Amino acid sequence: MGACHWCEYNELCGGSRARARALTSDYMAAEPHCVLGEEVMNRHLRDLAEKEKAMS
Ligand code: SF4
């Protein structure tokens, strides 16, 4: 679920799996049209990268 997996609003939102599939061909991709906007999505992606870096 990309950034949606780490999103603090995941349990409320989760992102649209249908929209992710339609626009990226990957239903597990991050929601392409995050309701919180690009700035929030970019913050989630940065947080995800930092978490993955810390785990490696
Ligand atoms: S679509 Fe946006 S608000 Fe919803 S879970 Fe994904 S990152 Fe979070």
Image (spheres, rainbow, N blue to C red):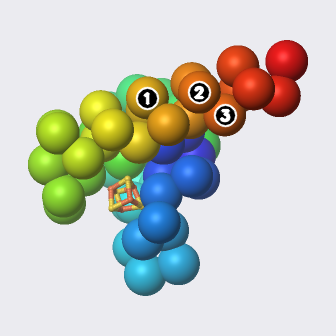
Closest to the observer, 39 or 5: 39
* Location of residue 15 with respect to 30 vertically, above or below: below
* Location of residue 20 with respect to 5 vertically, above or below: above
Q: Position of residue 56 (x, y in %)?
A: 85, 18
**Mark 1 or mark 3, earlier in chain:** 1
Classify the position of ligand 1 by quadrant: top left, top right, bottom left or bottom right.
bottom left
Looking at the rendered structure, the kind of residue marked 2 is Glu
Q: Is residue 2 left or right of residue 41?
A: right
Distance Cα–Cα, label 2 vs label 3 = 4 Å
Closest to the observer, 35 or 52: 52
Crowd rating for badge 1 (residues with CA inside 10 Å; few <14, some 14–19, many 20+): few
Name the outermost residue toward the right: 56
The answer to whether any part of residue 22 appears in the image is no
Please name the residue that numbered disc 1 is placed on: 46
Mark 3 and mark 1 in contact (Cβ < 8 Å)? no
Q: Secondary structure at mark 1?
A: helix
Mark 1 and mark 2 in contact (Cβ < 8 Å)? yes
Distance Cα–Cα, label 2 vs label 1 = 6 Å
Crowd rating for badge 2 (residues with CA inside 10 Å; few <14, some 14–19, many 20+): few
Q: Position of residue 16 (x, y in %)?
A: 38, 60
Looking at the rendered structure, the kind of residue marked 3 is Lys
Please name the residue that numbered disc 2 is placed on: 50
Q: Is residue 55 left or right of residue 7?
A: right
Q: Position of residue 20 (x, y in %)?
A: 40, 43
Q: Is residue 10 left or right of residue 40?
A: right
* Location of residue 34 with respect to 12 vertically, above or below: above
Q: Secondary structure at mark 3?
A: helix
Looking at the rendered structure, the kind of residue marked 1 is Arg
Q: Secondary structure at mark 2?
A: helix
